[in-house]
Image (spheres, grey):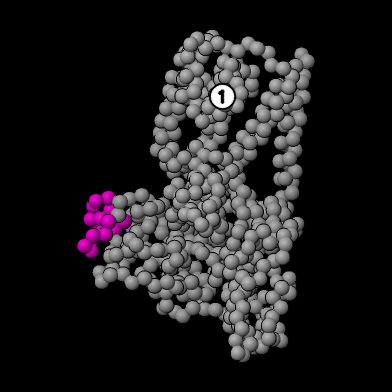
Amino acid sequence: MNYLITYTIYVLIISLLMGLATWKLFKKMGYSPLYAFIPFYNYWIILKETKHSKWWAVLSYLPIVGPIMMSVFHILLMKKFGKKGFVNGLLTVVLPFIFMAIVNYGKDPQIETEQEDEETKKKETFLGSVTFAVVFATIIHVFMTQPFGIPTGSMERTLLVGDFLFVNKWAYGFRMPMRPVALPFLQGTIFDSGQKGNPKDDPKSYIEAVKLPYLRIPGYDEIKRYDIVVFNYPQDSVHVATDRKDPYVKRCVGIPGDVIEFRAGRLFVNNAPEKILGDEQQQHGYLVKTSSQLDIPQLYKAFGFLPVQENQTNEGFVYAFQGLTDETAKEIKTLPQVIDMQEIIEEKGVAAVRYKLNADKTDTKNIDTVNSIYPINKPWNPDWYGPLTVPKKGDVVKLNQETLPQYQWIISEYEHNKLENKNGKIYVNGQETNQYTIKQNYYMMIGDNRDASLDARYFGVVPEENIVGRPMFTWLSVEGLFSDANSTYQASGKKIRWDRMFKSTNTGETHKASYWWVAVAILVLFFGWDFFAGLFKKKKEED
């Protein structure tokens, strides 16, 4: 309801600005000036008067797409009143209601009656085709499926570095855009300044001031245990907008109410060993001692993804491998140079990153939770973790100095309350309390490459509002596209993995269905529409 109310307010504000800026122009076109204030109908009139497809008016106020379409409609209106050329077009896009108001309240604006030549018509046809292509792609991207690339190895062998996925946004419920004015196809920033700059200073691809509350349209499926899920990184410090935070992909190992625990690097869910699906390639880290140097490039060719650090000692060489399946580890262990091979498992009771709080354990505001185990007051590490109960909507949890680190981010950031911890007492929205009722469901997201994954063991449980969707299929896969900072060896050159393209990614089955028909259907739809639209236009002109 809050979403609809806020959305309606934005529509009314834009319609009011549109009416105030163009009412005289509508009167000149032979319509009541009041029509300039009516949402959708005002743009329908502009399209009718400029001889363009009137159905485009329904796109006027859609998030992301709407601002693009409005700019097009404004340009068409200004051209009808003689304001043509690049400068006028730029002013119409950048300062729409100001520039249109100048024309509207100027000295007796007149409709341009000059006939356009053939070259101008061709140019407009081309620009119209480009606009249609951009709008069509934006609608697909925003409202149906979003492409997503995998730059790191946290899901390796199940999903490879260099895989590009299409994500189904409707499976778990479509999350309405929360920043409706944004550049299409860009996630959070227009460009990345790299290591030299502060990411917070990178130009945003969206307008932060124009925002809508969270709303999810119910989907046709629920997140199941062991689903691969795409979500927005919860603790992204660069982007405040939930739907603009960096996208991550992990396996959901814990649904609301589950109890998660790692014992010696192995996961237990509700006190039972996790279920390994047919398409899951789980990996761990290993320390390998050898009498002589290994041929790492040859091993890479034999076993694929193989991040490794190499150190020479007096006795030989020591290799720290990441991303080894049980089968791969057995094969490497049989190499003649191998003296000893042990799985890397951290000591129980020793936290991955330990922070000392003050005496009363209340000074938590300056702790960097990104690089520490969640929650920060537990002596846990990635191999010995939990037991941790995944919060469920409606749960009433106890709040005290011991439990607060587990729930403080949930209460203050994910569920948007004012949380204070003063003099050993806890206040939520100004009221002292010793309990809290969870407002939404949460999920435990873990990478299949268990020892090389920044996942929920570090950043904590993922709120429902951060869920983007479920991967459908890999539409492109390129080996060597992304470098690995953790490896002393990189794949030479780039190579397309044809065998992975248009294959399903989230079935849990070893056999993967092919989606080549989707690519063909999209191409036929796009070019077919353009072809038949051209025939229809030609016939109409002949008639």
Q: Is 424 covered by the magenta stretch?
A: yes
* Residue 511 spot, x, y in % from top left: 71, 60
* Residue 390 spot, x, y in % from top left: 43, 62
For label 1, the crowd category at 10 Å Cα-Cα, with few meaning under 14, some 14 to 19 and many 20 or more, is: some
* Residue 48 spot, x, y in % from top left: 60, 17
Determine the secondary structure under disc 1.
Answer: helix
View extreme (left): residue: 423
**Location of mark 1 (residue):** 88
* First to last magenta residue range: 420-436
Q: Nearer the viewer, residue 65 or 385?
A: 65
Write down the quadrant of residue 276 in the picture: bottom right
Quarter of the N terminus within the rendering: top left
Residue 225 in sight? no
Q: Residue at x 52, y 12 (%)?
A: 109
Amino acid marked by disc 1: Asn
Residue 142 in sight? yes
